[in-house]
Image (spheres, rainbow, N blue to C red):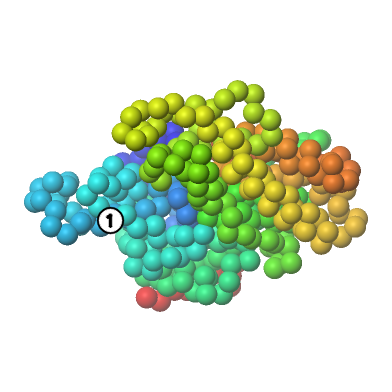
Amino acid sequence: MSASSITNAITSDHRKRLLKGNGPGRAADVPGNPAAAVLIGFDWGTNKSCIKAALSGAKDDSVSLIVPTVVGYTNEGIVENLLPGNRRTFFGEEALKHRLHLRLVQPMVDGVIADLSASRDFAQHIRSLIDPPAGAELRAVIGLPANAQRAARESLRHAVAGVFDRVILIPEPFLAALGYRDESRLARPGYVDPVQNSLFVDIGAGTTDVCMVQGYYPTAEDQISQAFAGDKVDALLNEAIRKTYPDCALPQHKICEIKEQHSYVGQLDKPILINAVVGGKMRRLDVGEQIGGACTELLRRILESVKLLIARASSDSVSELLQNIVLTGGGSLIRQIDTELQRLLTEEGYEQPRVRVVGERYKEFVAIGARKAARQAKETQWQQLIA
């Protein structure tokens, strides 16, 4: 799903009105009052980030955005008035639009902070998009890769100190399960609660996280994270295309575009043909085998992580756990990845596994779960940040 298809087209004035409630004198104008807090669910992704925000106590989100996780800084010696407003820094779609004249920086690599300065700039940009009312405290629940190390957590805290007032850091697969959960259906017969006993596989750009979700925040033993995900698939695909067509040099964004449009595992029903410049001439290239090989390597690694976590589960929970394996993240859109993982698990001897994908709205679920967690959090769980 594209960013534009789910973004709330909220003007600044409308956003303020939604967050402030009924006007001056309300709790929203009192600094430090939990009732005045703006609660933010923040899925800070390697390639794209999703934000859900609302005033504490509000039923609906007042801000819902997906933003490419990229910061662009103007190149030295740029001609005056070439870029809008002669600005020096651009974010998201606007940075990508003007990339020819910018130095693009990814704040996140493999799901963790890679450039602290760019990360702080990006976090400030997110705050400006939320546009909180004066005096409101900003409380953000932010997703992290499963089993993120202490250094990664500290880097994230440094990046948002002075931007948000209080934070809670929670593993992304758990947040995805919480966001995917439909509370309105919990009492209905046959509804399988994803938070009760499930295995969530979150296939992002920087990391692939596998997590047992059994009704509580997962421990280190309940999670496996590996830095092999969408970006590594891009690298394998690029390498395979160059090996097959040595004169073909595709830019990184084109490789990613090919993967997102044609990715698959399992049997290929027809050739995958792309247009590319080879030796200065436009040619039609068959890249089906190369795409399948790169995606199959990702599937193989997911299978091994899933098997490891199943082995760690208690014997009395495995049967139900196998019935509730859920794929989310951008990699879950790889064609046939659910049926192929299910087939491989069956061949490995697991009894009647059931694998499903969350669908096109995958990018929203971590942020939705983070916002839910923010609403449920106890006052003692919030960590205060001081710049």
The image shows a total of numbered marks equal to 1
Picture residue at 43% right of the left edge, 65% below the top = 114
Res 227 visible:
yes
Give percent across and percent down for residue 214.
Answer: 76, 56
Dot 1 amino acid type = Arg
The correct choice, above or below, for 17 with respect to 287 in the image is below
Is residue 41 or residue 16 the one in the foreground?
Answer: 41
Near-viewer residue (112 or 229):
229
Residue 378 percent location from the top left of the image: 60, 66
Residue 200 visible in the current orientation: no
Q: Is residue 125 toward the left or the right of residue 2 in the image?
A: left
User: Who's the residue at 59% across and 55% down the image?
Assistant: 228
Q: Nearer the viewer, residue 355 or 214?
A: 355
Badge 1 local density, few (<14 within 10 Å), some, or many (20+)? some
> At 61% across and 37% down in the image, what residue appears?
292
Q: Residue sitting at 39 percent across and 66 percent down?
A: 115
Observer-nearest residue: 5 or 101? 101
From the top left corner, tell me how far across and down residue 345 is, in percent.
Answer: 81, 44
Determine the residue located farthest toward the top in the rendered image. 270
Which residue carries the number 1 mark? Answer: 103
Q: Secondary structure at mark 1?
A: strand
Give the vertical position of 285 relative to 64 (above or below): above
Most extreme residue toward the left is 80
Residue 165 spot, x, y in % from top left: 42, 68
| Above or below: residue 237 compared with residue 385 | above
On-image quarter of the C terminus: bottom left
